[in-house]
Image (spheres, grey):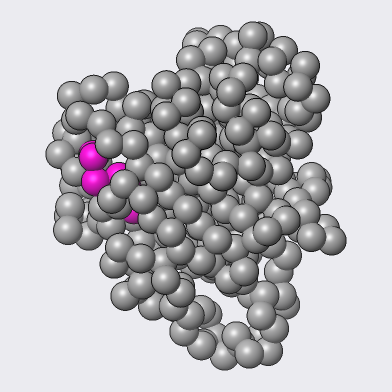
Amino acid sequence: MAGGPSSIGGELFTPKNIGLGLATVAIGFVAGWVWPQPTRLTFLYVGQGDCAVFQHDGTTILIDSGPWNPKSDAGERVIVPKLRQMGVSGIDLILLSHPDMDHIGGTGSVLKAYPNAIIAASACFRDNKQLLKQLTKWGRRPSDIKWLGPELKGTVGTFNLRIDCPQTDPDEETNDGSMLVRIDDGAASAVFSGDAPSKVEEAFGGAEDWHAEIMKAGHHGSRSATSEDWIQAVHPEYAVLSCGLNNEYHHPHPTVVNRLKSDGVKICRTDLEGDIRFEIAGRRFERVKP
Ligand SMILES: [Zn+2]
């Protein structure tokens, strides 16, 4: 709860100008004294999938919720216990990059633990059968979801939040509709691109400012993403590759790892290192031990 004494005592916080209906949602804090927490970005090791947790100014945003299969639910197994360890008492927003199970699978368990979380997804996936089926499983209706248009701009504390949702045909590959997210406060910054392939990176790369200290490498380090042009557009200090140890897809692809290395980008791999955490030190994100 950054913001110190003024935000203590059950005060309500409404994201300023978060747009597209989110502004109407008041976000509640737990009453009582809470020490100010650092601004943190944590990539949880959820196996073969993605889940990033952004904590800033008393707000917690999840970007994706890890994988689910009948034998393993990353939400129950990893995300909820880790969030509790991290002292997260409420989730304000869950951004679902696209409806593949390695990105949305843990949502049900997360919602059980944090029922007030708002879920947002690209409006392109409003009719996606898999997402609709999962919503029912989670006890949510399509009208409970914030369906995002092509571009959303907002703020979370001192951070700008920009979300671009590629406009894809529902019959196309779901990866092509992966939302692109950039957070920045003028110094600390990060970019997420779900499983967006290079053609999406190319379509958006020149159109906006994507420069960021931290890049979540697209599609778990698959060679379908993280093109040289995209690396140049983001120009990151760190790239986070989120994938399962010895995964069946052989992510990350050596071409991508070598491309990042030769561009001088520091590589962080969840499969080899577990959770990857950054905190603001000075003004910029620095890697810290989780
Ligand atoms: Zn994926």
Q: Is residue 244 left or right of residue 198?
A: right
Q: Is residue 239 above or below residue 89?
A: above
Seen from the viewer's position, the closer of residues 224 and 80 is: 224
* Number of disc labels: 0
- Judged from this view, the residue extending furthest toward the front is 206
| Residue 279 horizontal side relative to residue 228, left or right | right
From the top left corner, tell me how far across and down residue 249 is, in percent: 50, 11
In the image, taking residue 197 as reference, residue 246 lies left or right, namely right
On screen, residue 119 above or below 123: below
Residue 48, how many percent across, how many down? 51, 25
Q: What's drawn in magenta, residue-wise? A: 120-125
Q: Residue at x 20, y 29 (%)?
A: 169
Q: Nearer the viewer, residue 195 or 44?
A: 195
Position of 210 relative to 62 (above/below): above
Is residue 98 something that shows in the picture?
Answer: no
Q: Does residue 250 appear in the picture of this structure? A: yes
Residue 59 to residue 253: above or below: below
Residue 185: x %, y % from top left: 65, 60
Residue 213 image position (x, y, % from top left)? 71, 43
Residue 264 in the magenta stretch? The answer is no
What residue is at 80 percent from the left and 25 percent from the top? 264
Quadrant housing the N terminus:
bottom right
In the image, 254 versus 158, the foreground residue is: 158
| Residue drawn at (36%, 72%) of the image | 23
- Work out which residue is located at the far right of the displayed protein and give it: 282
- Residue displayed at 42% across by 71% down: 17
